[in-house]
Amino acid sequence: MEWSTLMETALTRWGESALLVAIGACTGLLFGLGAQRSRLCTRAAVLECCEGRPGMRLAIWALALGGVMAGAQLLVAAGALQPLKSRFMDATGSVSGALLGGLFFGAGMVLTRGCASRLLVLGASGNLRAWVSGLVFAMVVQASMSGWLAPARRAIASWWLVDGGPSRDLLQTLGLPPQVGLALAGLTLAGALWFFFRQKDRRSGLLMAAGVCGLALTAAWGLTQAVASQSFEVVTIQSLSYSNASAEWLMRLLGHAAAPAWGFEAGLVPGTLAGALLGALWGREFRIEGFQAEHKLLRYISGAVLMGFGAVLAGGCTVGAGLGGSAVFALTAWLTLLGICAGGALSWRLHRVLGWPV
């Protein structure tokens, strides 16, 4: 049975909503398991670079990026993914939002000791600090989308807008053919593998877990594109992203009447939690951990606020924009990734100056 026929049959039997929830749950489960076992963490990778000792945490992050880049570009080359119709390129974007939102997010992830996806993974492993930070993050995301922070977010985003379509495609903006994207993806993956095998503490399990993260992100791109191609309804073509999904679940748990309809992001959060919990139990790493003397509550809350506002302003988090969006060479996603790295470095420097533990 051809892939298109299989997808059409699934849509007829289950409908768009149920199928998208299942896709979100399955790809989230894969990512949660891979992220927990590999300890994928953008914050840790940035701090390794800031401290002048790039090592395994950077290698893991680079492997995840190289994996999803290679997977997404292979899908593009095969005609199974159309980036211009994805959420990163279809509508008007904001350069100012991507840069400043990335700065805010990067600074916040250092304060909270983890980005949005990392907080989910830690929370599933029993970390109560991650649950507190994640709750504040979800609240601020919702406030930035349609609440009292929305006017400030819209004002900053309006400073420098970029039209949707080819203007948001980095390759087309630079006048490069699509084949260059596949070549760059191959080079990125090869470089990540080379760097990984140079590490003294390299283990095959870490390599496989990082590969699972890249596979989950790639699968999300391909499967949401497949549903969008067969469905008569408007379906967002996307990869994993945890900002909107966290706010959506907060509204749903509170019984809010304006909660979005069930779809991909509704399955993503519980799937990721289940995958991370499975990984923690598998590795016997589940343990309840609360705030300790060196963990300042105000610092965690401040970081969660910065991350929540920054994620909405930038249009993505370290996974949504930093990995998924960058893999399809979305201009604003790459700007967001640069902003996150810069914000994390500035926050690290501030910690050093003030004598705070990082």
Image (cartoon, helix red, strand yellow):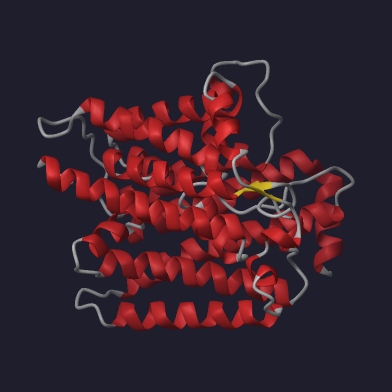
Residue drawn at (62%, 76%), measured in percent from left and top? 181
Q: Quadrant of residue 105?
A: top left
Looking at the rendered structure, the number of numbered marks drawn on it comes to 0
The quarter in which the N terminus is drawn is: bottom right
Residue drawn at (61%, 54%), measured in percent from left and top? 239
Residue drawn at (78%, 72%), measured in percent from left and top? 79
Q: Name the residue nearer the viewer: 306 or 174.
A: 174
**Residue 277 shows in this picture:** no
**Residue 189 shows in this picture:** yes
Q: Is residue 315 above or below residue 129?
A: below
Residue drawn at (87%, 62%), measured in percent from left and top? 5
Q: Is residue 219 above or below residue 176?
A: above
Q: Name the residue nearer the viewer: 303 or 274.
A: 303
- Asked whether, in this view, residue 325 is left or right of residue 16, the answer is left
- Asked whether, in this view, residue 260 is left or right of residue 61, the answer is right
Q: Name the residue nearer the viewer: 251 or 34.
A: 251
Q: Name the residue nearer the viewer: 223 or 168.
A: 168
Residue positioned most to the front: 159
Q: Is residue 33 above or below residue 49?
A: above
Residue positioned most to the right: 232
Q: Position of residue 298 (x, y in %)?
A: 24, 25
- Asked whether, in this view, residue 222 is left or right of residue 150, the answer is right
- Asked whether, in this view, residue 208 is left or right of residue 334, the answer is left
Q: Quadrant of residue 179?
A: bottom right
Q: Quadrant of residue 63?
A: bottom left
Q: Position of residue 15 (x, y in %)?
A: 81, 42
Q: Position of residue 334 (x, y in %)?
A: 53, 60
